[in-house]
Image (tube, rainbow, N blue to C red):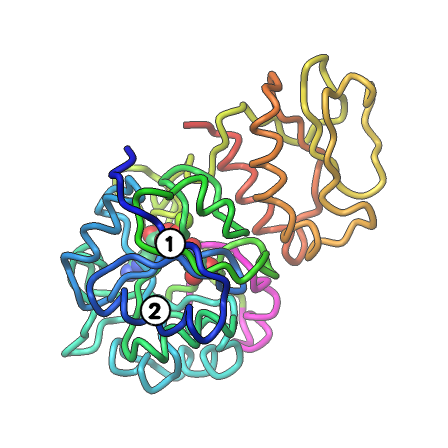
């Protein structure tokens, strides 16, 4: 659906920041870079703006949003921090970590953004452009990834434009993002739970906590009752089928490789992209969504994906790949 709305694309800078803050204040929708992926921002206190945001993304309204704030003071007006939550916030904010916390009494985030839950997801992004816009706007900004629901997250302004031109007011182009996968989400309940692996590796969080993160209950992944509906089984799917842990290539398949390529019949691949030739997981995370988007345009029968180690950022990469493989 193209609504006929004109989507303005501005290069990041003082003018774009001021314009973006004004558009947000009027209930508009602004896409901007964060260090993880591009987000689609709306005023967290404006239910009408948030309704437009769900509509622009084609996102089910039961999928709650992350409130992005500029500092810990703002975060503490939104949610209740216990000792563990504070430790995590102090260790990793600003950065690619989202905390799910009990709402504060007069939480300014609209009910629609939290999907009626009594918890709220918060993060302080590390990207200068994101922080400048939030500061200039002067309040919390809810921002899901700036893609159509079900598509892979955008890591460039052009990805945002492809999905959302004509549906949102503005895109601030700050170049490609650094991390490339979404933030790690930790539910700060009595025992902190890893709700979504992401740009901050589990081991770093566990080092600060001094104990392992819990896993979500087994039914958290069910589409009916998502705990972190980013965990909907098929959230990150390209149109082309994805075949995981490929040790060979079938005729007509695209190959998504990693490190030194050790697959049988590599020459059968219609196209190959290597996430990181030197086997670097941070580089692979940064390339992941862009490469999936590119391979998805090549009319391959499937995207064959080489195995990727599960350590560090590999946990988030494999999580997104498994969801991509479920299809839509
Ligand atoms: O890196 C990121 O986190 C990016 C950038 C833009 O900040 N944002 C992002 O937002 O990935 P989104 O909406 O695509 O994913 C947010 C996830 C969803 O899976 C949602 O279900 C979960 O956070 N979430 C939000 N509020 C929650 C809550 N109260 N309890 C559990 N999960 C929650
Ligand atoms: Mg998303």
Q: Residue 19's mark? A: 2
Check if residue 124 falls in the magenta segment.
Answer: no
Q: Work out which residue is located at the far bottom of the displayed protein and give it.
A: 73
**Which comes sooner in the sequence, label 1 or label 2?**
1
Q: Quadrant of the C terminus?
A: top left
Tell me if label 1 and label 2 are in contact, CB under 8 Å: yes
* Label 2 SS: helix
In which of the image's four quarters is ligand 1 placed?
Answer: bottom left
57 up-or-down from 242: above or below = below
Q: Which residues are magenta?
A: 190-211
Residue shown at 85%/40% (left/top)?
A: 260
Residue 121 % position (x, y):
33, 65
224 up-or-down from 41: above or below = above
Residue 267 % position (x, y):
83, 19
User: For mark 1, what is the residue?
Assistant: 8
Side (left or right) of 327 relative to 313: left
Closer-to-camera residue (295/9): 9
Check if residue 198 falls in the magenta segment.
Answer: yes
Disc 1 CB within 8 Å of nearest ligand 1 atom: no
* Label 1 SS: strand
């Amino acid at each position: 659906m193209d609504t006929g709305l004109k989507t303005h694309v501005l290069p990041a800078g003082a003018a774009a920041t001021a314009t973006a803050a004004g558009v947000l204040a009027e209930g508009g929708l602004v896409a901007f870079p964060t260090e993880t992926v591009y987000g689609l921002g709306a005023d967290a206190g404006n239910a009408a703006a948030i309704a437009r945001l769900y509509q622009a993304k084609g996102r089910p309204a039961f999928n709650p949003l992350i409130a992005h704030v500029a500092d810990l003071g703002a975060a503490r007006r939104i949610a209740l921090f216990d000792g563990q939550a504070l430790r995590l916030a102090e260790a990793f904010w600003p950065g690619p970590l989202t905390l799910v916390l009990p709402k504060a009494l007069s939480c300014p985030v609209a009910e629609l953004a939290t999907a009626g839950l009594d918890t709220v997801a918060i993060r302080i992004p590390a990207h200068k452009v994101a922080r400048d816009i939030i500061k200039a706007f002067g309040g919390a900004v809810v921002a899901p990834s700036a893609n159509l629901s079900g598509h892979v997250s955008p890591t460039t302004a052009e990805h945002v434009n492809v999905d959302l031109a004509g549906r949102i007011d503005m895109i601030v182009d700050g170049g490609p993002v650094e991390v490339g996968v979404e933030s790690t989400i930790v539910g700060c309940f009595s025992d902190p739970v890893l709700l979504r692996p992401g740009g901050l590796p589990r081991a770093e969080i566990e080092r600060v906590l001094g104990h392992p993160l819990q896993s979500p209950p087994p039914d958290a992944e069910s589409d009916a009752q998502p705990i972190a509906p980013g965990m909907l089984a098929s959230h990150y799917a390209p149109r082309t089928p994805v075949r995981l842990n490929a040790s060979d290539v079938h005729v007509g398949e695209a190959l998504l490789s990693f490190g030194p390529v050790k697959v049988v019949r590599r020459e059968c691949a219609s196209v190959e992209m290597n996430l990181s030739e030197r086997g670097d997981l941070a580089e692979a995370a940064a390339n992941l969504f862009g490469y999936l988007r590119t391979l998805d345009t090549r009319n391959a029968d499937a995207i064959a994906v080489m195995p990727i180690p599960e350590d560090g950022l590999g946990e988030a990469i494999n999580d997104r790949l498994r969801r991509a493989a479920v299809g839509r």
